[in-house]
Image (tube, grey):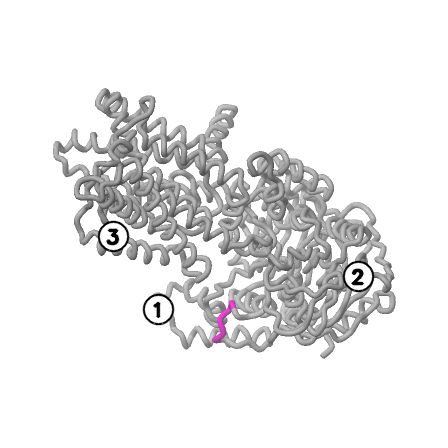
Amino acid sequence: MQQTAQRNSFMNRLMGESQTLRLFIITLLIFVGFSLVLGDRFLSIRNLQSMAVQFPEFGILAFAIMITMLTGGIDLSIVGTANLSAIAAALVLTRLSGEGGAGLPLEATIPLAMLAALTVASLCGLFNGFLVSKVGITPILATLGTGSLYTGLSYVITGGPAITTTQLAFIGNGSIAGVPIPVIVFIVLALVFAVILNRTTLGFNIYMLGTNTRAALFSGINDVKVLVRTYWLAGLVAGIAGIIFLARANSAKPDYGATFILLTVLIAILGGVRYTGGFGTISGLVLSVLSIQFLSTGLNMLMLQLSGSSAAIFFRQFAWGALLLLVMVVNYYVEQRRQRVT
Amino acid sequence: MADEIIRLTGIHKSFAGVRALQDVSLTLERGKIHCLVGENGCGKSTLIKIIAGVYQRDSGSVQINGKEYEQLHPIDSIREGIQVIYQDFSLFPNLTVAENIALNEQLAEGRRFVNWKHVRHVAEDAIAQIEVQMPLDARVEDMSVANKQLIAIAKAMRQNAQLIIMDEPTSALTEREIRVLFTVIHKLQQRGIAFLFVSHKLNEVLEISEAIIVMRNGRVVSTGLANEYNTTRLVYEMTGQSIAEKSYEFTPDLSQPALLRVENLTVPGALYNVSFEMRRGEIVGVTGLLGSGRTELALALFGMLPITAGQIEIDETPVKIRSVQDAIAHGIGYVPEDRLTEGLFLEQSIGRNVVVRTIDKLRGAFGLTDPARVKQQVDEWVTSLRIKTSDPDLPVKTLSGGNQQRVVVAKWLASNPRLMILNGPTMGVDIGSKNEIHELIKRLAGEGMGLLVISDDIPELLQTCNRILLMRNGSIVQEILPGETNENELAAKLIED
């Protein structure tokens, strides 16, 4: 009897209120699981470093999609925004300095390039915000449209091929005190978003608007203002992700990271962000980013080991889709269980 | 014996150690109108769900039509002719009236294709049975609450209802609609259908019911014939204490400037040339049927409807109210009609609901929200409005109706409005909380706030307001002083054409 009670309370804790703890345990289990199965190949300094430079790309984008999902919307244009921003930065870099450029010193060009990227990203985000709040288009449709628009614009600008520049490689490959710079950017953004969501009026209003748009209206929350700022922030973060893309790949191209959209949605949902809005934490998101990276690397190694071919990489796409559906189904049953209890 | 539909004996039910029902015994008889009354949380809903087979009892016996049920499942209950009409009516808003009435049995009969002729025929028959008029091809979402309720009754009748249980059947109806409902119920009663009402509106309970069952804290504390009860006794049985309300007497000082002056306010299709004024400390009631413009007046003053003509003055200064933000800037607060969808963020915490208006002011270092100040403000309001909760971090949906309404009021009070508009302030709230909300309204008026109370609860208006404005077809047709009228007279005026 007492044992059942204990097990029940353990189950409840795992399933119920403390979602972050549940995620932490899941992340840990994934990590330990792969370490046991794959041994040194997974649990090596080299592999850990390799994972550390991979996750910030989609991890940063996950912040962008999360903040829009919290309002009950979504931003499907983030990858398009990131690539367009990366192209803007690459253009500034190649035209103003480097071979065949205007000959400006790199110290001056890099800030200009970043400014260009962030300006483009801001404009993309503001346009999304305008469509969603002022025009009132459903976010999923508005951003599906603008995403295609931004990608198309990238093709028009580049004519198709990538713009190559190694001038930002010091960011992509560099590290400070042993921590890769992209990871530092990820951590800083996590902190900034934690502050925005928990300690600012904008963050508070984002949660409230996402919980009940109508009650928000009746409580005097200015939905247009909140939505424009949210999509602007999402765009800005996508721009930062774009700079990281460029720094890591040493090139900017229109179709980079096409799978990141599904991946970031998966991360957000797995991280406990409710797709109808109003709920989700940064700690949940960060844990979710880590567990997805562990899964990605671990599954790759496992498939490679089993099939011996590099076709295994395509399995990942399948795995992400399956995992997203699985998490949604599990969430559905957890929610049902919770409602029965209360 | 033969005319018993349901006999419950010694029913017990607990949830996670909390006793919801204790030793509940009752019988419901064929062709009789019963009423179950009790405050929120007294166990009424649990009892209904046990009869409907949704919950399983812990102990006790359930007999339906003379048959003992060891375990009662929802399907058994429906087969025995028990139909529960919940407050949301369980209708499909996007389907037509005919489809809502008839599709259920088409499904039950296992048909793969819909026979539209048959659907129509069934629906016509069902509507004719309850002797009302209804456009069968209209979508349910376009129908009024009253009509939705009649559709739900027609649907229940098609499923051979013997006992119809209705949760708060009159709470969203106007006086005239209540009359229509009562007529339908009396007709069905003559055919041997039994009813069980669950209601808060005591006057209506006494008017239509024949048998009364009062519950308190999970027990049946009193049962008897309706004529053995009056409102005072019902309140006493429900709460275990006598509550007497004093009316609000206030004579505005006309030499003081007007807090609000509305002149010839017009919103096309809703309001026409509405003029009135009110002073600090006044509680002005606004009443009328649904569609009379009472809610539209509130929405217009709160910046949610476009005003095309007329003028609004606050403290003798003309103001433009084009948005909710404008209204708030002029010190207007609004407690909306529909608490659950308009007033509250149900899944967010009680605390967050309280500070939603003031969060921007509760900032500390670096302009960031100061959690200590937020907590302080939340605690302050939870204490001063006596919001009953173990933890303000719990979702607001865990509260009872009365406590939820206090959260909505707290949200506005925290931002110090000069004028509060309350639309149906005690709808779906238990007697004890209702009384406390009335006392709160009077206290706020005493502190110099102006309050506009929109309601069709006539005793409420008479007890809390110092003036009542009667609206009809978008205009104010009469101003009434509570001292110069009584409940029946005001009720009659309400439904006059």
Label the magenta part by its dominant secondary structure. loop
Q: Confirm whether the magenta stretch covers residue A52.
A: no
Kindly check if marks 1 and 3 are in contact, taking CB atoms under 8 A apart as contact.
no
Does the image show residue B70? no
Q: Nearer the viewer, mark 2 or mark 1?
A: 2
Give, as a single range, the part of the protein colored magenta.
Answer: B137-141
| Three-letter code for the amino acid on which mark 1 is drawn | Phe
| Three-letter code for the amino acid on which mark 3 is drawn | Ser
Q: Which secondary structure lies at badge 2?
A: loop
| Three-letter code for the amino acid on which mark 2 is drawn | Arg
Q: Residue at x 62, y 33 (%)?
A: B372
B10 on left or right of A31: right
Count of labels shown?
Answer: 3
Residue located beneath label 2 in the image: B279
Q: Which label was assigned to residue B113?
A: 1
A52 on left or right of B25: left
Residue A294 vs residue B404, the one in the foreground: A294
Residue located beneath label 3 in the image: A154
Subunit that carries the residue with mark 1 = B
Q: Is residue A41 above or below residue B92?
A: above
Crowd around label 2: few <14 · some 14–19 · many ≥20 (10 Å): many
Answer with mark 2 or mark 1, whichever residue precedes in sequence: 1
Q: Residue at x 22, y 44 (%)?
A: A102
